[in-house]
Image (cartoon, grey):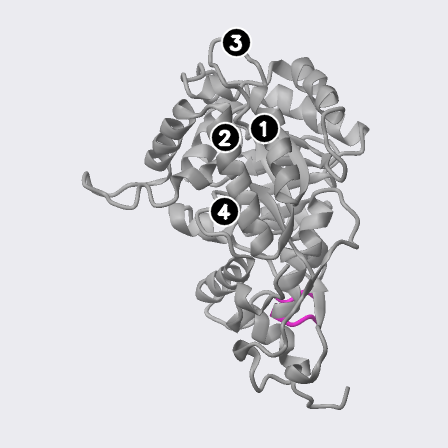
Amino acid sequence: MARGAFVSEILHPMLPAFTSAHSHAFQIGLRGSGERFPTGVADFWSWRQAMYGLVERMDPDLAYQLAHRCYREMVQAGIQTVGEFHYLRHHVTDQPDFVLDQVVIQAAHDAGIELVLLPAAYEEGGPGVDLSPAQRRFVSGGFHGYWERFDQLQGMLRSGQSMQACVHSLRAVPWDQVQRHVVEAHRRGLKLHVHLEEQPRELAEIKAAYGDHPVRLLLDSGHPMEHLVGVHMTHTPELQLVEWLKRGATILPCPLTEGDLGDGVPVLPDLPHLKNQLALGTDSNLRISMFEEMRRLEHDQRCRTLRRGALRCGGDAPAETLWHAASTGGRLALGLSECGPSLSINPAHHLLTQVDEPSLLDALVFGGDERVLESE
């Protein structure tokens, strides 16, 4: 390839395929809902009540339709691997049946996406708070019940599917159980995903119940950290995020969902070793586009720091850091090998007109969308 050659002269350039490392597939059923505010300002907690309304209407047929639709949209958007943070487990509320576990497994298989199932431990509606009727569909049966079901699910997976461990949050699982899950996941060689510090109210409730904020509790627990994957971490102080990453743990922001819910913007530190510990997810799946997730993450950090090129790992350009987070970083967060499927880029697409080869990735990340991907 001659220096300065245009991308249109390259035959089918290939890049690592996208990985959505954090998804709640059923929440695609909320698309278009909750965007009018007749009673005034809404927030995460009012959105959560609307989500519980969808949960209470859920049956296996609807759960399959929503999950299959979500996963097909992902495949069409270049996402070939998904980490399904799965807490909607039961069809009925009075007796745990785990019927919806198999629904998600089947939907992913039928959609042709690589599934890493993250069955979530979920025990209470907040520290010492009973489960609401909707939340009873999430219950995982205590520490031993969680791992018994985890082992059962291993035998239900289809070819090419896998599992990692998951705790919904420190609001939904008592702190003593969270620590046991951290230890057990490490003993089994598993990643453990957990929602962390998405909302200020979460920090206040956990500190009132257990004496400190969630991330500080985990950092001071004395347990191994390198297998932990913190989802959101929107309100985690920068020094704690630095410590989190230096201890080998991963951060997994979901910029479009965090923007939609008004969560806030995480304070991502400028560390050379951030690259392999940063992943991205589509979360609520309101909009399924890793191109937009990448741009939103970088643009939010630019607005926060008042400088361009906010996310650079070592000598990498922002586009390299972002594409890695949207692809290989997600695979690492899901316990998969770095080498995964690839995407073929259409070099003749008009969005890439007059783009030279060295600028391809920058043009894709900051000016591209799914239209530049070769069709299946």
Report whether residue 143 is seen.
yes
Q: Earlier in the sequence, mark 3 or mark 4?
A: 3
Q: Amino acid at mark 4?
A: Thr
Mark 2 vs mark 3, foreground winner is 2
- In the picture shown, does residue 96 fall above or below 365? above
Q: Is 272 part of what is drawn in magenta?
A: no
Secondary structure at badge 3 equals loop
Residue 234 is labelled as 4
Give the residue at x 39% y 32%: 51
Q: Residue 262, how many percent across, how many down? A: 38, 48
Mainly helix, strand or loop, the magenta region?
loop
Q: Can you identify the residue that label 3 sits on?
A: 95
Specify which label sits upstream in the sequence, 1 or 2: 2
Q: Earlier in the sequence, mark 4 or mark 1?
A: 1
Residue pointed to by mark 1: 103
Q: What is the distance, in whole Å, between disc 1 and disc 2 at their CAs? A: 7 Å
Of pointers 2 and 4, the one earlier in the residue sequence: 2
Amino acid type at circle 1 is: Val
What is the span of residues highlighted in magenta in the rendered image? 312-318
Q: Are marks 2 and 4 in contact (CB under 8 Å)?
A: no
Please say if the residues under marks 1 and 2 sit with CB atoms less than 8 Å apart: yes
